[in-house]
Image (cartoon, rainbow, N blue to C red):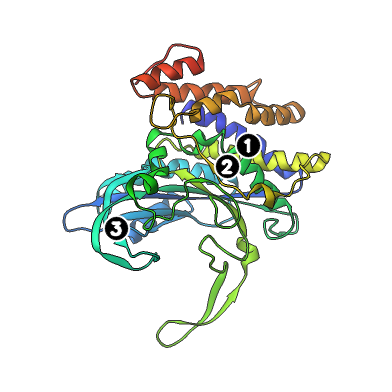
Amino acid sequence: MDHLSHIAREALKLLQAEVLSYGFKPAIHYELEGGYKPRPGKQLDYQAVNKSMAKLSLQAELKPEYWQCQWEYVSLFNGQSPLQESDNLYKAIQLLPELLCKHGAQQVYIRPVIWNGDRGGMASGSRAIFHHTARDIHIPNAVQLNLSLIDSHGNNLMADGPLAEQIQCKLLETSYHYCALFLPEEEAFERIRLKSHYGLDQELSSPVNLSGGHQGSIALYRQWGKHNQPMGVETTLLDCEQQPLVTRQDWRRGARIEHRLGASSPHYNPYLNSVFALANVVDVLAERQHGTMPAKRCSEQQADAKPLPHALYDSSLGEFPGPSALALLQQDDWLETILWRIQSHRKPETEYNDIGAALKQELMASFTRRQPIGDATANLASINGNPTETI
């Protein structure tokens, strides 16, 4: 395990214990999208891949996604902790290319965009009917983080009351300065611009900014999902043609916050993103305990969508001026403060005197080590205040 993941894993243990100390059990589930190029005359054998994943105890399954040769890794709800879930995805990102190549793939892509990955075109006003004029489609691949909180009686706290909305609002607030965690490479920002730059608004439903509600990029799913579909509908009886005859709805069990902005990438770190998610939970729980929650209603704060930075590294010289994601990350100390506060009162056994500072230092160093050559390199040197290193 790399050093950054090791520190983040220790921080995640700390945060997980802090949420439990409030009497709540946190749950995180990941979904990861990717693509593949099939071997000549072959198709991906999903059943065989899932058998291999089960042997590796990854607690997830692989299934076909919407576009041609696109797949989705979906976490199974087996009661795993955020730490276990992060372990699973960390291993999956490393192992999936080899697994898929054993079962029909020639190449495997875990990246934000598969350029020219499919051909098609949606008819105006439809997400299901293809237009007769086909064109190249650039396929966005996402990482989605699903967050819920369970009380001591087994109730899902995302289903009722203001707590879920408050956590959603906190995530909307902090995700701007910490977007480098879930958009960890420059191509991730190209993914955000696919609709506007390539005219794919009809074809793509991926989010492009920070927005709340039940259809935004950080969505709270209760009775309704992102497409306004009823949530938690289960078929209990099929007719003779295997069509649903009787259904029931239990949306409370699956109520959750879904953070939909993450970009699929080998650089996506599940430990870091789980740390980020639980830090938001802890911050809200502490504010509620001390009576310092903002008086303004969360629904009012979610009214306006907020654009994301336009680049990971330097964006001042390009088409879109403004602070880069790394500049915002470097300037902010919210996550360090949360971790220091917890470490100060819990006093865990750890090799890090200040785990928040250690995490921030290694995180910035990791971006420096893999930065591109050119103006962005020079800019990152000025952000970090030290010479750059490229690999």
Q: Nearer the viewer, residue 234 or 224?
A: 224
Kindly indicate whether the residue at mark 2 contacts the one at mark 1 (C-beta within 8 angstroms): yes
Query: Which quadrant of the rendered structure holds the C terminus?
Result: top left
Residue at which label 2 appears: 83
Q: Nearer the viewer, residue 246 or 346?
A: 246
Q: Earlier in the sequence, mark 1 or mark 2?
A: 1
Residue at which label 3 appears: 68
Which percent across, then down, holds residue 304?
A: 60, 47
Q: Which picture quadrant has residue 353?
A: top right
Quick check: can you spot residue 162? Answer: yes
On screen, residue 321 above or below 46 = above
Q: Earlier in the sequence, mark 3 or mark 2?
A: 3
Which percent across, then down, holds residue 240?
A: 42, 88
Q: Nearer the viewer, residue 106 or 247?
A: 247
Q: Residues within 10 Å of mark 3 (few under 14, many from 20)?
A: some
* Amino acid at dot 1: Lys
Q: Residue furthest bottom?
A: 240
Alpha-carbon span between mark 3 and mark 2: 33 Å
Alpha-carbon span between mark 3 and mark 1: 39 Å
Instruction: Say which residue appears at 76% left-offset and 39% top-offset.
Output: 286
* Amino acid at dot 3: Gln
Which percent across, then down, holds residue 101?
A: 27, 48
